Image (cartoon, coloured by chain):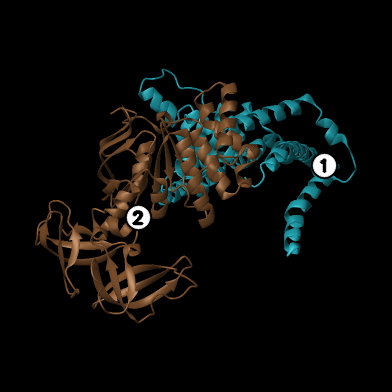
């Protein structure tokens, strides 16, 4: 496997009683933008720090570019970390910060100057080269931190919540900038984040983590469209769920018999391989796949459920609301802003929710 | 709000110095005491090479004390600053506990350890590491040891305060960027803890330069520092005016060199901006 950048095998890290990283295995390809996504305490930062060499695994192995990282201290690893707080040296200029890694590696002076200049150009900070970090804005500091890592041309750049300290607007701008820089330099990026939208927007692939375990690995569209478990369904995007039992499973499709609900007709779902009739499952649908119409009469084709609108919120580009189905099931719905800000359905009104059988993802309950 | 501060400064700082200044221009009475006759005689006496030699030796000893305290204090302060907070408190208390014992008693303890039939010599003889007791006490080395022992905490505390404030991520960043221990120390720790280093050096250098108890007890007749000289003029020779002139000249040299040093540092700090 020559295109493998990072090979993590059954990695374990304990902090006292808690298992921060629990038998994690991941293969990250060369030149890939890979994210570790999860809530706090998921173990993603521990994993990143083990890649950087600041923490030692209790078990398992890390190989970077085919070389085992066991007993290799941080200052000998072909990786550079972009710290969450940026950790720029406050007593050095921007250029001094960027040159630090090259000076430590005893790169010839003339070469250092050229590489620092080129890297500052890449992050569009050439005019700030003689400033002190304290004189820069948050976004500029972030770019210095990135330049300080990139200038060394490491095998892997590690990023710890790279955009967390920036405000919303800057964040989106930096997202696309970060991605385009990564594509330009072609270096493997491994990014830790708890921000699911950011992870989806930046990553070629990502791993969703929870309590030290990897819940699912895949491309952003795999995770969003085909979550393999409820945690991923709920953590990556909003999840509208109905619990039930499968029936009449045949050739990859089947019916869902919901618990405690009386659907107007059987709910058709596509069924993943290996699930039989009688299996307890949860079906989940993304909000934007649901079409809401006022009234009570069912339309032909597709799945359909009755509901009552509980709240409706106008956020400009669309309406977001909550619809109650039966006694206690609540679904989030997104209705497009069709024109002049008109409320698509009134609060308290009975509505019909329609969705295609292909959009209902079935997750087995274990 | 300014008034109390000014009052205390005038009362406890300015007034005693003015008294010393006045005395330094007076003359010594026949049986000690001060005769209020204006004279520059005391300052002329100070030009004698003997005083220069003692001052030189004192500066050297104080500088060596400061250097040793820095070299020993930095690793200790770094170690404490990197401990979990509760352990830090314990270590700081341990460092300050000796202050609760009289300095004289602690210096006598060193005599007990260092003298010819002392703890160290007895131990070394028992272990057959030496054949005859070593001459440890009453030497410049013994004075240096005593001074380092006495003033090490004054170095450790400001260094600890400075190191503790450094963001641990900066140290990790240096490490991540291929720095070895020496580069980390030289290029990151020292520049970032410079105010603590300066404070520690000043706090050690000044009292060691003026020390008289330690050189008196551990150096005996073989070692004389400016402090002893001043003490001698005041208490033995009963020449208050000469002692006052000595004190003032020493104070001017110390203050002058510190002001000069801080001035030399100031412009570079200014350039750092908000950093």
Where disc 2 sits, the SS reads loop
Q: Which mark is residue B9?
A: none
Q: Residue at x 87, y 35 (%)?
A: B41
Q: Which residue is situated farthest in the right direction here?
A: B38
Please say if B194 is above or below A338: above
Q: Color of chain A here? A: brown
* Chain that is coloured cyan in the picture: B
Left or right position of A268 against B179: left
- The answer, for residue A20, to whether it is visible in the render is no
Q: Quarter holding the N terminus of chain B?
A: bottom right
Left or right position of B22 against A267: right
Give B119 or A100, whichever is nearer the viewer. A100
In the figure, residue B158 lies in which quadrant? top right
Q: Position of residue A157 (x, y in %)?
A: 43, 37
Q: Which residue is mark 1?
A: B24
Q: Quarter holding the C terminus of chain B?
A: top right
Q: Which residue is situated farthest in the front direction here?
A: A300
Left or right position of A211 against B95: left
Chain letter of disc 2 in the image: A
In the figure, residue A116 lies in which quadrant? top right
Q: Residue at x 28, y 52 (%)?
A: A211
Q: Position of residue A340 (x, y in %)?
A: 50, 72
Report the mark closest to the observer, 1 or 2. Answer: 2
Where disc 1 sits, the SS reads helix
- The answer, for residue A330, to whether it is visible in the render is yes
Q: Which residue is mark 2?
A: A39
Chain letter of disc 1 in the image: B
In the figure, residue B225 lies in which quadrant? top right
Q: Position of residue A65 (x, y in %)?
A: 34, 29
Same chain for marks 1 and 2? Answer: no
Q: Give the tally of numbered discs.
A: 2
């Amino acid at each position: 496997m020559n295109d493998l950048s990072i090979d993590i095998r059954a990695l374990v890290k304990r902090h006292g009683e808690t298992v921060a990283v629990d038998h994690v295995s991941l293969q990250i390809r060369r030149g890939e933008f890979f994210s570790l996504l999860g809530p706090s305490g998921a173990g993603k930062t521990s994993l990143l720090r083990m890649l950087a060499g600041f923490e030692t695994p209790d078990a398992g192995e890390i190989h970077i570019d085919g070389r085992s990282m066991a007993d290799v201290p941080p200052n000998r690893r072909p990786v550079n970390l972009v710290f969450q707080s940026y950790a720029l040296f406050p007593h050095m200029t921007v250029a001094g910060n960027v040159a630090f890694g090259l000076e430590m590696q005893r790169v010839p002076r003339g070469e250092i100057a050229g590489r620092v200049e080129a890297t500052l150009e890449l992050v569009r900070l050439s005019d700030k080269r003689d400033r002190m970090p304290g004189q820069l804005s948050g976004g500029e500091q972030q770019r210095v931190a990135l330049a300080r890592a990139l200038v060394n041309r490491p095998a892997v750049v590690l990023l710890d919540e790279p955009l967390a300290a920036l405000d919303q607007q800057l964040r989106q701008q930096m997202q696309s900038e970060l991605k385009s820089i990564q594509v330009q330099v072609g270096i493997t990026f491994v990014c830790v984040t708890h921000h699911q939208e950011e992870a989806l927007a930046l990553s070629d692939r990502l791993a969703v983590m929870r309590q030290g375990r990897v819940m699912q690995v895949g491309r952003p569209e795999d995770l969003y469209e085909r979550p393999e478990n409820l945690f991923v369904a709920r953590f990556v995007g909003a999840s509208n769920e109905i619990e039930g039992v499968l029936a009449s499973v045949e050739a990859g499709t089947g019916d869902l018999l919901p618990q405690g609900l009386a659907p107007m007709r059987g709910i058709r779902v596509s069924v993943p391989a290996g699930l039989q009739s009688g299996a307890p499952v949860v079906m989940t649908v993304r909000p934007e796949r649901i079409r809401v119409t006022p009234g009570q009469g069912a339309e032909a084709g597709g799945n359909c459920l009755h509901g009552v609108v509980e709240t409706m919120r106008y956020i400009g580009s669309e309406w977001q609301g909550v619809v109650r189905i039966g006694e206690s099931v609540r679904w989030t719905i997104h209705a497009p802003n069709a024109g002049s800000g008109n409320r698509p359905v009134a609060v308290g009104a009975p509505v019909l929710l329609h969705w295609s059988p292909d959009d209902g993802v079935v997750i087995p309950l274990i | 709000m300014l008034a109390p501060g000014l009052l205390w400064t005038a009362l406890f700082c300015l007034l005693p110095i003015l008294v010393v200044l006045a005395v330094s221009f007076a003359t010594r009475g026949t049986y000690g005491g001060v005769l209020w006759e204006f004279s520059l005689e005391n300052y002329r006496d100070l030009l004698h090479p003997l005083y220069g030699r003692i001052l030189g030796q004192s500066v050297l000893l104080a500088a060596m004390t400061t250097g040793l305290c820095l070299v020993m204090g930095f690793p200790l302060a770094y170690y404490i600053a990197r401990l979990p907070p509760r352990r830090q408190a314990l270590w700081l208390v341990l460092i300050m506990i000796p202050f609760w014992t009289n300095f004289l008693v602690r210096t006598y303890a060193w005599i007990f350890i260092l003298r010819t039939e002392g703890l160290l010599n007895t131990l070394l003889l028992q272990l057959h590491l030496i054949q005859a007791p070593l001459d440890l006490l009453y030497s410049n080395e013994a004075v240096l040891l005593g001074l380092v022992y006495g003033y090490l905490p004054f170095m450790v505390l400001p260094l600890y305060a400075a190191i503790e404030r450094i963001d641990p991520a900066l140290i990790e960043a240096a490490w991540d960027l291929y720095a070895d221990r020496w580069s980390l120390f030289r290029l990151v720790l020292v520049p970032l803890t410079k105010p603590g280093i300066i404070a520690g050096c000043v706090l050690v250098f000044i009292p060691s330069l003026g020390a008289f108890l330690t050189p008196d007890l551990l150096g005996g007749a073989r070692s004389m520092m400016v402090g002893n000289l001043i003490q001698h003029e005041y208490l033995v020779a009963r020449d208050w005016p000469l002692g006052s002139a000595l004190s003032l000249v020493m104070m001017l040299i110390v203050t002058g060199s510190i002001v000069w040093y801080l001035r030399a540092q100031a412009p570079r700090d200014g350039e750092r901006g908000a950093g």
